[in-house]
């Protein structure tokens, strides 16, 4: 019995079997039904619309938010023998006309379009004159006005069902809470779409969160000790921070590049191209970078500032280890991060409901940082999923100690209370710690705070320890950053039972977490020693071919495919057909070269 979906998977993409919900999603769309798909980065979302587009008559229209990545997506499909093209503002008029002609002639399997281009009268009229197999709305969370990557133009995409009611639509994203899923379905008119929610777990990623203490030095230690020569992404909160960090890494010998919205479009495109096409590049960026990046061998994602939400954090860390190999998600944060983000929310021009939502999202992120339980448990619980301890995060590998912080909390809260109640004053964290530690600074003496009854009551705890107490009180919503934007601290209603001794508080004790290496060399060690020369030779061959074709190396073959070749050492084309990731087109294009590489290394080993 014919199985078009499986035949396409095997012949075009070179994989033996579907994973997870892929088959069910594909069958839903092939039959003409709508689908809302939540699948983690690296889970194979693209196959869920690419295969239906190849099976159904007409052209699959893919709405993708970043035009800078369309070229690589189209290049990857072209290597597989798929007839793919894109329409965006980077093309010459003659190129645009040729793509339009090919679409109208039925010569395209997939056409990538940015949402801004799609909703123009010219593009809509073009689509109306051709035959459409499906609409795929990638990065569908961009439609959520409460989300971390909101794109206003996505709100217009509900028009598609009005103009093409019989064309199936599939919306895909790697991150969305139940609330965001509901918003996607509502705003894209996918009320009757079947929803497919895969596990959010990425077990190959090791999650680690540390306290900031000279964060540039900490970042450099992570790269030097665990990820030297690896591709990675470093996220920063501001453009200035990006520039400063990238320059520092370059001075330290790291191949680092900056990326933020303040750079020219040309520089951004150039840096992104280098990151995708070269090995061992570290991109230092704001959250403006990364959506849709399909580079599979990013070995680490580091945040040197606190992300604004768990959804954003999950989306960004998900760009590590798309190939399934070990990867690191590393975050360093401090008390100042919390104060700064609260101030940004307070100063925002957004409506009150939006600011309130942002505040709740930040509280959840802070809770993840300060948890004493499994990081992955807390992360997945945010998306409504539960797991046992993962044994691949810092709190599982080195369980943190807890201590009774009730008395310490009472001392700190009393200081805040007395300053406000007795003197009508509010101060930030640094000044409060100076009072508790009994430091007669110029500012303490200026305000006469050495006369307070709480002056010096916290001398037994050092500055770092008090910052930890402050962060955990903020995470528990016992303390709050004021709403005036000055970064001072005030009490919440939850402080009352603590001050009265009616509630015990157990705190996380800060420890130095032993590092767990996830270097990309692990991928090499998974190859038996006798197969490593062939593996390296295959990688060198791939690099040369990719350079000749002007595409990233992973578009030719990923490491997993080369590793399987190195281990199994196929002797003929029939053997190569059994290697995962080698479809008909690639077998024809590269089969002889691969066999020659195997033979050459075998011959040299005999000599």
Image: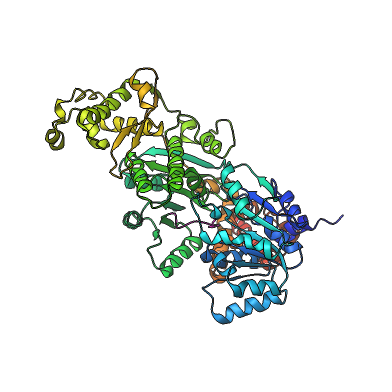
Query: Can you say whether 314 is above or below 33 in the image?
Result: above
Q: In this rendered view, identify the residue nearer to me: 14 or 368.
A: 368
- Decide if residue 368 is on the left or right side of residue 424: right
Q: Is residue 335 visible?
A: yes
What residue do we see at 37% from left, 45% from top?
A: 341
| Residue at the extreme bottom of the image, as rendered | 94
Queried whether the magenta region covers residue 435, the answer comes back as no
Location of residue 199 by image quarter: top right
Q: Quadrant of the C terminus?
A: bottom right
Q: In this rendered view, identify the residue nearer to me: 173 or 531.
A: 173
Q: Position of residue 426 (x, y in %)?
A: 25, 35
Query: Can you say whether 393 is above or below 588 in the image?
Result: above
Q: Position of residue 552 (x, y in %)?
A: 54, 63
What residue do we see at 37% from left, 34% from top?
A: 474
Q: Is residue 511 visible?
A: no
- Decide if residue 180 is on the left or right side of residue 359: right
Q: Which residues are magenta?
A: 287-296
Q: What type of secondary structure mainly makes up the magenta span?
A: loop
Count of numbered circles on the image = 0
What residue do we see at 58% from left, 45% from top?
A: 526
Q: Position of residue 429 (x, y in %)?
A: 27, 36
Query: Can you say whether 214 is above or below 454 in the image?
Result: below
| Residue at the extreme right of the image, as rendered | 1
Queried whether the magenta region covers residue 293, the answer comes back as yes
């Amino acid at each position: 019995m014919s199985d078009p979906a499986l035949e396409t998977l095997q012949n075009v993409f070179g994989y033996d079997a579907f994973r997870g919900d892929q088959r069910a999603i594909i069958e839903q769309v092939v039959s003409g039904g709508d689908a809302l798909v939540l699948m983690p980065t690296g889970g194979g979302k693209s196959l869920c619309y690419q295969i239906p587009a190849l099976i159904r008559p007409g052209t699959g229209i893919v709405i993708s938010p970043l035009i800078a990545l369309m070229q690589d997506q189209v290049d990857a499909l072209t290597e597989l023998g798929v007839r793919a093209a894109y329409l965006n503002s980077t093309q010459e008029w003659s190129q645009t006309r040729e793509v339009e002609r090919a679409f109208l002639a039925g010569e395209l399997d997939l056409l990538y379009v940015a949402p801004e281009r799609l909703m123009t009268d010219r593009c809509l009229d073009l689509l109306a004159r051709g035959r459409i197999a499906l609409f795929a709305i990638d990065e569908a969370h961009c439609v959520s006005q409460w989300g971390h990557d909101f794109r206003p133009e996505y709100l217009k995409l509900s028009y598609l069902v009005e103009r093409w009611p019989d064309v199936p639509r599939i919306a895909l994203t790697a991150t969305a809470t139940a609330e965001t899923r509901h918003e996607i379905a509502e705003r894209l008119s996918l009320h009757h779409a079947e929803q497919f929610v895969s596990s959010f777990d990425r077990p190959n990623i090791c999650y680690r969160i540390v306290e900031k203490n000279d964060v540039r030095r900490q970042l450099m230690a992570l790269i030097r000790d665990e990820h030297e020569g690896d591709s990675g992404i470093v996220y920063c909160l501001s453009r200035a921070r990006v520039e400063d960090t990238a320059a520092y890494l370059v001075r330290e010998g790291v191949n680092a590049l900056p990326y933020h919205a303040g750079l020219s479009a040309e520089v951004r495109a150039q840096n992104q191209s280098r990151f995708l096409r070269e090995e061992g590049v570290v991109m230092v960026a704001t959250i403006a970078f990364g959506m849709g990046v399909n580079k599979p061998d990013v070995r680490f994602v580091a945040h040197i500032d606190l992300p604004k939400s768990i959804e954003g954090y999950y989306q960004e860390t998900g760009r590590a280890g798309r190939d399934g190999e070990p990867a690191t998600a590393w975050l360093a944060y401090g008390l100042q991060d919390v104060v700064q983000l609260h101030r940004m929310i307070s100063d925002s021009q957004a409506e009150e409901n939006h600011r309130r939502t942002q505040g709740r999202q930040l509280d959840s992120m802070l809770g993840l940082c300060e948890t004493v339980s499994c990081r992955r448990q807390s992360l997945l619980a945010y998306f409504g999923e539960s797991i046992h301890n993962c044994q691949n995060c810092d709190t599982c590998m080195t369980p943190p100690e807890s201590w009774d912080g009730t008395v310490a909390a009472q001392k700190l809260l009393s200081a805040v209370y007395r300053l406000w109640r007795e003197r009508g004053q509010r101060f930030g964290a640094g000044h409060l710690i100076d009072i508790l530690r009994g430091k007669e600074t110029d500012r303490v003496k200026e305000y006469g705070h050495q006369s307070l009854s709480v002056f010096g009551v916290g001398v037994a705890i050092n500055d770092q320890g008090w910052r930890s107490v402050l962060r955990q009180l903020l995470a528990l919503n016992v303390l709050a950053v004021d709403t005036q934007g000055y970064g001072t601290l005030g009490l919440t209603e939850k402080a009352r039972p603590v001050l009265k001794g009616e509630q015990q508080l157990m705190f996380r004790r800060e420890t130095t977490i032993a590092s767990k290496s996830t270097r990309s060399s692990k991928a090499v060690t998974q190859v038996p020693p006798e197969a490593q020369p062939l593996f390296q030779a295959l990688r060198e061959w791939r690099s040369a071919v990719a350079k000749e074709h002007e595409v990233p190396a992973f578009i030719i073959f990923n490491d997993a495919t080369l590793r399987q070749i190195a281990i199994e050492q196929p002797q003929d084309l029939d053997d190569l057909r059994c290697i995962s990731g080698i479809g008909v087109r690639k077998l024809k294009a590269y089969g002889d070269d691969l066999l020659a590489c195997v033979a050459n290394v075998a011959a040299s080993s005999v000599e």
